[in-house]
Image (cartoon, helix red, strand yellow):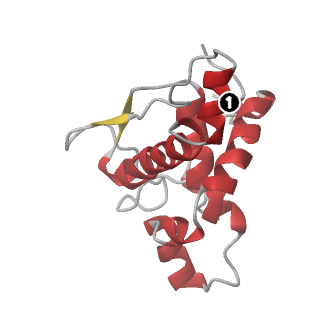
Amino acid sequence: RVFVQSHVPAHSELAWLLNCATPMNWLERMIQFKDKAKKQGTDKVGVGLFTYPVLMAADILLYQADRVPVGEDQRQHLELARDITRRFNDMYCKGNPYKKRCKAAKIPSRPAFTEPQAMIVKAGGARVMSLTDGTNKMSKSEPNDNSRINVLDPP
């Protein structure tokens, strides 16, 4: 089923909760942020790029996906989603006051999120390249609007 992500408030709500539980140094290590910050300077890179990996984790975790098809270039994002899952489940689901309250109330305590596994697309798989520079991957963040096919572009 196809839907508009921004029409589902749970995506941004979970992203906010996960942002609160994710250490900044985990995001500072993300390759996309480091590359853009090196090219443009950290004062010119928006916080959206910095926190985007947490939104991606929220997209995965919201639907309790246990296997996620990703290209090699997205492996780091999925590893972050796994790290966030472990941290969140450890903070709120294992031997802490929350678990004790659940036990006292006779409510089952279990991990909040499923830890996703990567299904890496093999080399030669579908990788859509930029329409203006065939050596680079197509990207929504590319300033040139002609470098990509946008969802709302006419057929």
Q: Is residue 48 above or below residue 99?
A: below
What amino acid is at disc 1?
Answer: Arg
Is residue 4 left or right of 123 when viewed as pictured? right
What residue is drawn where x is 72% and y is 27%?
A: 4
Q: Nearer the viewer, residue 69 or 24?
A: 24
In the picture of the structure, the residue carrying the numbered disc 1 is: 101
Q: Nearer the viewer, residue 148 or 78?
A: 78
Q: Residue furthest front?
A: 104
| Visible residue check, residue 149 | no
| Visible residue check, residue 132 | yes
What residue is drawn where x is 62% and y is 65%?
A: 50
Residue 72 horizontal/vertical position (percent) = 30, 49
Residue 21 horizontal/vertical position (percent) = 63, 54
Q: Secondary structure at mark 1?
A: helix
Within the image, what quadrant is residue 116 found in? top left
Within the image, what quadrant is residue 63 found in? top right
What residue is drawn where x is 27% and y is 37%?
A: 121
User: In the rendered view of the protein, which quadrant contains the C terminus?
Assistant: top right
Residue 83 horizontal/vertical position (percent) = 44, 50
Q: Is residue 48 above or below residue 79?
A: below
Q: Nearer the viewer, residue 150 or 97?
A: 97
What residue is drawn where x is 64% and y is 59%?
A: 51
User: In the rendered view of the protein, which quadrant contains the N terminus?
Assistant: top right
Residue 62 horizontal/vertical position (percent) = 60, 29
